[in-house]
């Protein structure tokens, strides 16, 4: 094979490899949830959207079919599955620390984990993750660099 043919077929091969690499990454991406640390911006309490109690942090990191994070006082983890924009979060296990400050933190923690487990659909738009249960927004998260 002469040098021109070698270069031509080599270039075609590299383009094909690049195409298949991009396709593989696109098909193996898990709905934009994976690997991002999400922080709760709002949660629905009795149908009203509220921000977390000052001084508390509610987070979720989705990774390899498991979600883990902080619920205000305790850390938690649970399994999860997605199918397109459908979401199913399994029962959460959490550490057992009791926190009495700030006021209401334990009630907020129970509410957050309950809402997370009730979510049946999600949407990601512009670095904002929104979760819904029966078509009502229950949680809104922000990712990094979306302040």
Image (cartoon, helix red, strand yellow):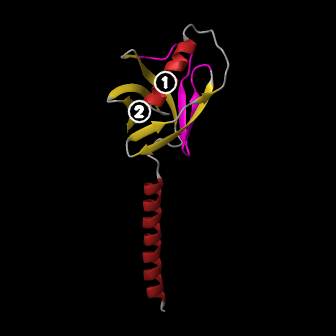
Image-based side of 91 in relation to 26, left or right = right
Image-based side of 127 in relation to 98, left or right = left
72 drawn magenta? yes
* Residue 99 sits above or below residue 76 on the image: above
Residue visible at 32% across and 30% down in the picture: 135
| Closer-to-camera residue (40/96) | 96
Residue 32, image x, y percentages: 45, 43
Residue visible at 47% across and 29% down in the picture: 116
Q: Residue furthest front?
A: 91
First in sequence: mark 2 or mark 1?
1
Start-end of magenta stretch:
50-73
Image-based side of 138 in relation to 63, left or right = left
Q: Residue furthest top?
A: 103
User: Which circle marks residue 65 in the picture?
Assistant: none
The quadrant where residue 23 appears: bottom left
Image-based side of 139 in relation to 34, left or right = left
Classed neighbour count for the residue bearing mark 1: other residues with Cα under 10 Å, few (<14), some (14–19), many (≥20): some
| Closer-to-camera residue (96/22) | 96
- Find disc 2 in the rendering and name its residue: 128
Residue visible at 61% across and 19% down in the picture: 73
Residue 30, image x, y percentages: 46, 48
Residue visible at 50% across and 22% down in the picture: 112
| Closer-to-camera residue (24/99) | 99
* Residue 48 sits above or below residue 16 on the image: above
Q: Nearer the viewer, mark 2 or mark 1?
A: 1
Q: Residue furthest left?
A: 135
Residue 36, image x, y percentages: 52, 39
Classed neighbour count for the residue bearing mark 2: other residues with Cα under 10 Å, few (<14), some (14–19), many (≥20): some
Q: CA distance from mark 2 to mark 1?
A: 20 Å
- Find disc 1 in the rendering and name its residue: 114
Under circle 1, the secondary element is: helix
Residue 56, image x, y percentages: 56, 17
């Amino acid at each position: 094979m002469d040098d021109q043919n070698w270069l031509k077929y080599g270039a075609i091969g590299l383009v094909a490899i690049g195409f298949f690499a991009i396709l593989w990454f696109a098909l193996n991406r898990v709905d934009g949830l994976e690997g991002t640390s999400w922080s709760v911006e709002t949660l629905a309490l009795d149908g009203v959207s509220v921000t977390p109690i000052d001084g508390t942090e509610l987070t979720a990191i989705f990774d390899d079919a498991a979600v883990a994070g902080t619920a205000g006082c305790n850390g938690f983890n649970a399994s999860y599955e997605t199918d397109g924009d459908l979401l199913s979060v399994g029962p959460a296990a959490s550490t057992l620390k009791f926190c009495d400050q700030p006021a209401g933190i334990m009630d907020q923690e129970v509410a957050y984990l309950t809402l997370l487990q009730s979510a049946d659909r999600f949407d990601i738009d512009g670095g904002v993750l929104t979760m819904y249960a029966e078509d009502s927004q229950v949680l809104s998260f922000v990712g990094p660099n979306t302040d």
